[in-house]
Structure formats: structure tokens, C-alpha cells
Amino acid sequence: TLYLLKMRVNCLHVAIALIALLVRRSVGFSSTTRGDTFRSSYIEISATAANDDRASYIDNDATISEDNPLRVIIAGGGIGSLVVANSLCINPKMSIQVLEKTDQSKRLAGPIQLGSNALAVIQEMDSSIFKNITSSITSIGDKVNGIKSGITDDWYSQFDLASPCGDIPYSGVMERQTLQQIYFDALPRGVVEYGDAVVSYEINSDGYGVRAITESGRIVHGDCLIGADGIWSSIRSTMRDEPVRGEGSGCTYSGYTVFDGELAYDSIDNGEVGYKVYIGPKQYFVACDIGNGKYHWYAFMAKPEGSSIEEDKPNGTSVYLQNIFEGWAHDI
């Protein structure tokens, strides 16, 4: 059980469960609560002891209502934060403010795969958002998917992603920018602010309320703060008293370096195969159909940390990778 200012519970525990399902470790949470701390493999909730003397809490009284809503600040404006913002905005007794560092027009990373279970959760959360997503997604769950030999191009194993689905939607792939725009468009105007990131925060000295400090020096007052500011989160590292990167941060180098890209490609199995994983000694290559004759590819190689920057590529990244994967399957 999570106690948020004792009476301030409502649907936050539901929202946190949804974050755990959809965005895994991308979210941390800090509130002024009783002195409880909850940790799991998905989400960080850091709490501070609250002063029982409410008379000293002058910014807001303890009664939650539509006129005096719970003030929730979300650091970061990515997909994870917009998902939880949409969930919380349903409650009229909550006021949500999302603060994002980058400009709204910035190009995001490559496509994102949504598994059948994730789509089923999205459908349960908001049917209109689900309809917008499924109208933009490229289904791969109804196609052939699996592992191939990187050298001979023969199938090692094919995955049946369709039969286990039952009545839930097939897995699919879509552009992150499109997915983010769908969630952004579903929010009330003014909830998301771009161009001013949360860089730190302070719990009020009386134990009630949190002050989020932005890059511009602005102070935003709230009752709780959710740290959804990316993998290298300064907010969550502060909550956990851990470094943002490196040893002790919880994020260590996997031993593999990855390059990825997108291209228009007239594959011989277009429309029949969703994704192919080509494997070989100390490296593998993935190609995934993302619709409209385009593919997303990524190449994994067992390399020392930092090698992607330190190794010379006089003829560019493409030629560098072609040399590494020389003799592999024609598609690669």
C-alpha cells in the first residue's frame, strides 16, 4: 500500500502499476508520505517522513478536491511519461504538469515494438488511444518471425506469435514519434511544457510538498514528482542516491555495441516475414518490417565499451559494418 499524504491515494497506485507494465524501469517516483520506501525491479518510489503538524503546510491544504487537486509533476516528456499523464488526467482531482527538456519537434529514436500484452493493456486503459495506435501500427504477430543463420541464411527457429494471442491484438511495430504524438494529442492543452527540463528537486522543509527546479531556474511546486526523464535519469539518481552513470548507477555495459538505422528495401519476403534475427559468433543482426516498404535494422557486436567512438571509420559507418559482416547473408 502506498500512502500519499495519507488521504492522497486515489488512482496513483493503479497508475504506478501501469507504468510498471508499460515502461519498466524508466520511471521513478518521489512524494511526501509516511516514511515508507518501496522498491521493485520496475519502479522506484522514494518517500520522506511527513510532519504531523499540517498547520505549517501553507501551500495547499490536505483535502483533495477538483478545486484543490493533487499536484503531480512529471519530469520528462517521453512515451512513458505521457502514458502515465494520460492515466492520471482521467481523475478530475489531479493536476498534471509534464516538463520536457527537448523541443517537441525533435526526432526520436527508431521504431518501437508493441507486444500483444502491451497492446491489450493499452486497449484496457483507453480505447480511443488504442484505436489510433492500431490504425498506425504494422502488424508482425501474424507473420513469420524467428532466428536465422547469419552465414547460410537458413531458419534455425520460427516463433508462433499468433496462436497464443487468443482475443488480444497481434504484436506490431510503429514509429516512436507517431506513438508519442498520439499520447500527446490525447492530453488536455497545456499539460506538457517543452524546452525546460527538471534538473533537481527539494522536499519542503516542513515535509509537505516538493519543489522541482528547472534548467531555467524556475521552481514548480507540487505534491509529488515522477522521474521519467530517460534511462540516464538525474531525478531518479537523486531519489536513489546513486550516480547517473557508471558503477553503482544500476546501468552497466552489456558487452555489446549496437548500430541501427532505417531504409527502404524491396525484400523478397516483404509482407510475409515480420522480423529476422541473424546470429553468428559474437555478433548478430536484426531486420524488422516497419511497413510501407521500410525496414529497421540493428547490428550487435561484442566489442569493448567505447569502441563505437574510438574505432576509426574512414569510409563511414555503413562500410565499417559491411566489413564486419562480410560473408554473411545477402540481406545483411
Image (tube, helix red, strand yellow):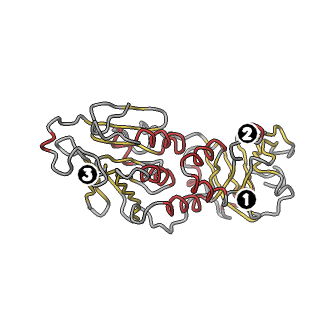
The front one of 295 and 65 is 65
Figure quadrant of the N terminus: top left
Q: Tag 2: Cα neighbours inside 10 Å, few (<14), some, or many (≥20)?
A: few
Q: Earlier in the sequence, mark 1 or mark 3?
A: 3
**What residue would you read off at disc 1?**
295
Q: Earlier in the sequence, mark 3 or mark 2?
A: 2
Above or below, comparing residue 320 to residue 11 in the picture: below
Residue at 63%, 41% (x, y): give it.
Answer: 117
Q: Tag 3: Cα neighbours inside 10 Å, few (<14), some, or many (≥20)?
A: some
Residue 258 in the image: x percent, y percent?
63, 50
Is 41 left, or right, of 110 in this rendering? Answer: left
Q: Tag 1: Cα neighbours inside 10 Å, few (<14), some, or many (≥20)?
A: many
Q: Which label sits in the foreground, 3 or 2? A: 2
- Tag 2 secondary structure: loop
Q: CA distance from mark 3 to mark 2?
A: 47 Å
Residue at 27%, 31% (x, y): give it.
Answer: 35
Above or below, comparing residue 330 to residue 315 in the picture: above
Q: Earlier in the sequence, mark 2 or mark 1?
A: 2
The front one of 317 and 332 is 332
Above or below, comparing residue 175 to residue 119 in the picture: below
**What residue would you read off at disc 2?**
166
Mark 2: which amino acid? Answer: Gly
- Residue 211: image tag: 3
Figure quadrant of the C terminus: bottom right
- Tag 1 secondary structure: strand
Residue at 26%, 48% (x, y): give it.
Answer: 210
Mark 1: which amino acid? Answer: Tyr
Residue 169 in the image: x percent, y percent?
69, 47
